[in-house]
Image (cartoon, coloured by chain):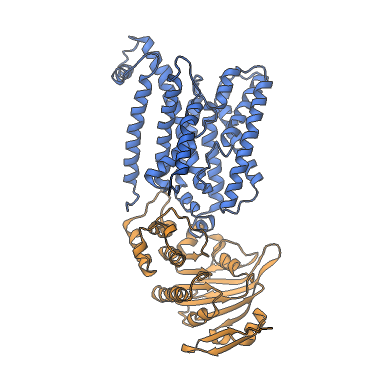
Chain colours: A orange, B blue
Amino acid sequence: MVNSGSIALEARTVDFAYRGPLIRGFSLQMCPNEVVGIIGPNGCGKTTLLKLLDGILCPSSGQVLLDGRQPLALLSRKEIARRIAMVPQNGGLPGHQTVFHFALQGRSPHLSLLGFESARDEEITREALRLTHLEGYADALVSEISGGEKQRLLLARALTQQPEILLLDEFTANLDVNYQVGLVSTVVRITRERRLATLVVSHEINILAAFCDRIILMSEGTVQHTGSPCEVLTAANLRQVFGIGFSVRQGINQAPEVMPLIQGN
Amino acid sequence: MRRLSRQRIVTVCAVLLAAWLLAALLSLNLGSVAIPPGKAFRLAARLFTGDTGQEPALETILFSVRLPRVLLASLVGAALALAGAVFQSLLRNPLADPFVLGVSTGASMGTILYIVLAASVGIQATGSLSLYARPAAAFAGAALTVAVVYFIAGRSDGRGEGSQRLLLAGIVMASFISSINVFLLTSTSQADLRGIFYWLIGDLSRPVDASIYVITLLVAVGAFLLYLMSQSLNLISSGEEDALTLGVEVSRVKLRVYLFASLVTGSVVSISGPIAYVGLICPHLARMVLGSDNRILFPAVFIFGAIFTLLADTAARTVVAPAELPVGVITALCGAPLFIYLLRRKGGGW
């Protein structure tokens, strides 16, 4: 773990219930310059967790603290949006805007009530488009770009917020594997460059294993295992969470490589 | 790519204001007696020099008949067009406007209920209480309708389907309340029925009383408060969850927008009746030229709505002179075909 010692965002024994408990006793400390990955089966509460960490949902008990001390519940949405950016699952993006203007929205939390984007805001936006390799599409309409480009655009908008904490929800879903690798390595590079505290939720166990400093294995709303990819991604742990067998072997860079054991008849 | 700036907004508004002035001069000129702009300016200048009374008939026509009507048509159009732009942005639906959502009809029900009740307890319709009570009743009718429409549509999840349900609920409510309005008017004995039935499709021909000052103030305050939320509404147009992550207090903004849009709509409808298509057509035309950033769209559409309705009302009182059409007939006559054209236009987006 690459840890600078300070805490960017902390969840302290967070519970959340909506028609029954969804998250139970979740604790996490996110630090600058660190990529944390969350793995777990569908319905284990990953998206709910991200909303709790972004303050969109409030814990039924426990707290989410910015810098390890300011409760999110006491901050305005705007204050939170200046510090925490969320890359949502690729939903239907409005198609009538240009790529540039869509990314420019990320400056909104930094604007005053009657403010307009300045030349500097536009510069920040162009920089984010450059980092996500979208600079050539600035004038294209959002409806004209591909699915992979839309995911990168959502990342670009989050970077335009200039956050300290980056939350990514299934942002490699529905992408070809080359795009997945490209996108995650971009996220890791930016995390290092800007010393972000980054949390990635994904189904792609191997990609998270290769890129994350720390992995959290979740099921049924609670953390089952947490630690380095090698510590967490063992056949026994994965079987416990997913309920099927896995073969795990050491891959390149010592990252574990995980294969589900598929049994025919 | 042009950056949005205060300067660009001021320029656009200045151009639109100049166009409004031309439309106003045209409207002041047209009618049974022509008052060309030069004449109008001379008469106006005499007001300041205290040299009035030379041409009393012309002065009465200009200052007591046409000018109030020009200002009223402008105010009503501005308010309805702004409310339309606001609802379209809030619901992410190009078909939303105060008329379609039933807000205008609800406001007219509030007004009619007030007039009927006030007459039955002996409150003078032109008395000082009515100056405030009539717009307040219209606002209550508008806000109540919005609440009911919201309730019928069920909890909106902020996605497309929710806003479709909301529109359908609005259309149902609008036709339901229209029937209540007709029922109320037919079953009451005091009302001047012909005038009131005109009013039900939007009419500006009734004489303007002092309530216009109260309504102007309400529209000005409501429009300003809505403008303050223009950037939040930009983000809500991209999706409510996205808006939350980008720092918008979505539920608070939505509640306020509904309230202020109901206030603006209700205030003018208490005088004009529900005029169709202004809130639908004006934002579309403005968006085609200016794009969909509400920070420039809202002020532009406010002035553009004034111009559109002023011209429509001028046509309403001149094309079949000496008779008059309700302005709602004109806005629907040009609004409906224009709207069909916009719908069928390829790649129009919104």
Give coordinates of residue A107: x percent, y percent: 41, 58
Give coordinates of residue A182: x percent, y percent: 43, 75
Residue A99 visible (yes or no): yes
Task: Name the outermost residue toward the right.
Answer: A20
Residue toward you, A265 or B323: A265
B72 lies above or below A74:
above
Residue toward you, B64 or B170: B170
- In the image, B22: left or right of B196? left
Give coordinates of residue A193: x percent, y percent: 38, 75
Q: Looking at the image, which residue is at 44% across and 22% down?
A: B69
Figure label count: 0
Task: Name the outermost residue toward the front.
Answer: A265
Which quadrant is the C terminus of chain A positioned in? Answer: bottom right
Give coordinates of residue A199: x percent, y percent: 51, 73
Residue B225 visible (yes or no): no
Q: Looking at the image, which residue is at 66% across and 82% down?
A: A244
B62 lies above or below B103:
above
Residue toward you, B204 or B50: B204
Q: Looking at the image, which residue is at 54% across and 25% down?
A: B131
Residue toward you, B88 or A122: B88
